[in-house]
Image (spheres, grey):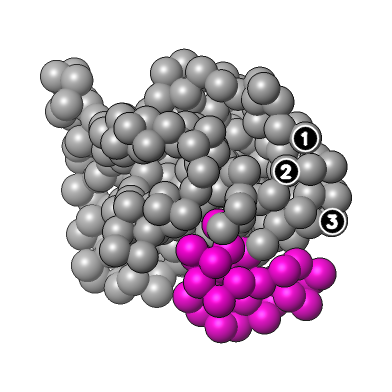
């Protein structure tokens, strides 16, 4: 059964950098949304955008037909749903949970089985595109669980590219693998700029050449000039979250018994960067971790 915009009640848990614009878009699109975040400032921002705020996750979920989670990881999702104050206890049989967080796919499968015992359906639907596309409503959404059609109207309020990836957990697997490819591309691009600058190449020119050539990728297109070359390192996506997604991709490879030496190396490199730069670092600061870029004279 497809959820109806006119009658469905949505609880949105997690009003951070991504969750706030996503929940706000749903409210602006005519969905009845009640949001909650443990950070008072996040709740205030959602209220200022026209959303309704609850005092707890359980209060937000009371009477909800759909719960959307946008939380840091699968552990936080599990705690929000099935912990001592978890919302699963107030959901009616037949309710749907859409986990739009970047969670570990194996854990997602286990959580789905647990919720199924209470007749609560779990769909994993992580997103890609960053804050800008969350604000614009142009996210890419990877939907696992085999029930994308039932929640498609809601997802279409958030994204323009909706992919049905397969059984439960497949969306989260795809998101982790996407971020692995993204991180590998960013790492390679930063190394290339550093090497080229040492030889006397202009980093901006290098970026233009890459974007007109086979080296083009998302990082060369949208991260090098605004964040890496000027060393502002302020894309809005943290190194901690990227390192977590890389660990997830590596753990998935191990779980499936697939040799993935590059995945392992990239995950280890980013974990070292996280340890050196700290939880607050932006993911584009991987450039600073690799080494300061030399100037045209090699200094």
The span from disc 1 to disc 2 (Cα, nearest Å) is: 5 Å
Residue at the image position 33 percent from the left and 32 percent from the top: 117
What number is the disc on residue 263? none
Contact flag, marks 1 and 2 (Cβ < 8 Å): yes
Residue at x 79% of width, y 43% of height:
7
| Residue 4: numbered disc | 1
* Mark toward the viewer: 3 or 2: 2
Q: For mark 2, does the 10 Å Cα neighbourhood hold few (<14), some (14 to 19), or many (20 or more) residues? A: some
Q: Which mark is residue 8?
A: 2
Instruction: Say whether residue 75 is left or right of residue 80.
Output: left
- Queried whether the magenta region covers residue 53, the answer comes back as yes
**Based on the displayed image, in which of its 4 quarters is residue 203 positioned?**
bottom right
* Residue in front for this viewpoint, 238 or 162: 162
Q: Are marks 3 and 1 in contact (CB under 8 Å)?
A: no
Q: Which residue is mark 3?
A: 28
CA distance separating discs 3 and 1 = 15 Å
Q: Give the extent of the magenta segment.
A: 35-61
Relative to 257, does residue 22 appear above or below in the rendering? below
Magenta-span inclusion, residue 287:
no
- Looking at the rendered structure, the secondary structure element under dot 2 is loop
**Residue 34 sits in quarter:** bottom right
Q: Quick one: quadrant of the N terminus?
A: top right
């Amino acid at each position: 059964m497809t959820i109806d915009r006119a009658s469905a009640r949505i609880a949105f848990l997690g009003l951070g950098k991504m969750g706030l614009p996503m929940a706000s878009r749903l409210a602006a699109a005519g969905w009845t949304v009640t949001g909650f975040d443990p950070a008072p400032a996040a709740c205030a921002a959602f209220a200022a955008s026209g959303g309704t705020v609850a005092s707890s996750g359980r209060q937000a979920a009371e009477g909800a037909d759909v719960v959307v989670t946008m939380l840091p990881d699968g552990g936080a999702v599990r705690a929000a749903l099935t912990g001592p104050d978890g919302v699963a206890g107030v959901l009616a049989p037949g309710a749907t949970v859409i986990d739009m967080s970047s969670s570990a796919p194996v854990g997602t499968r286990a959580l789905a089985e647990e919720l199924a015992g209470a007749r609560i359906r779990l769909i994993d639907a992580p997103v890609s595109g960053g804050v800008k596309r969350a604000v614009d409503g142009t996210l890419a959404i990877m939907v696992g669980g085999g029930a994308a059609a039932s929640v498609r109207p809601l997802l279409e309020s958030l994204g323009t590219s909706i992919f049905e990836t397969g059984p439960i957990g497949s969306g989260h697997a795809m998101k982790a693998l996407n971020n692995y490819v993204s991180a590998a591309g960013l790492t390679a691009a930063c190394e290339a700029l550093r090497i080229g600058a040492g030889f006397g190449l202009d980093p901006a020119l290098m970026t233009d050449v890459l974007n007109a050539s086979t080296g083009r990728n998302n990082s060369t297109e949208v991260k090098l000039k605004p964040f890496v070359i000027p060393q502002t390192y302020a894309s809005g996506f943290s190194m901690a979250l990227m390192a977590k997604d890389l660990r997830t991709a590596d753990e998935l490879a191990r779980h499936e018994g697939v040799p993935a030496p590059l995945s392992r190396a990239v995950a280890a490199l980013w974990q070292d960067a996280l340890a050196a730069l700290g939880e607050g670092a932006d993911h584009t600061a991987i450039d600073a971790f690799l080494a300061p870029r030399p100037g045209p004279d090699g200094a």
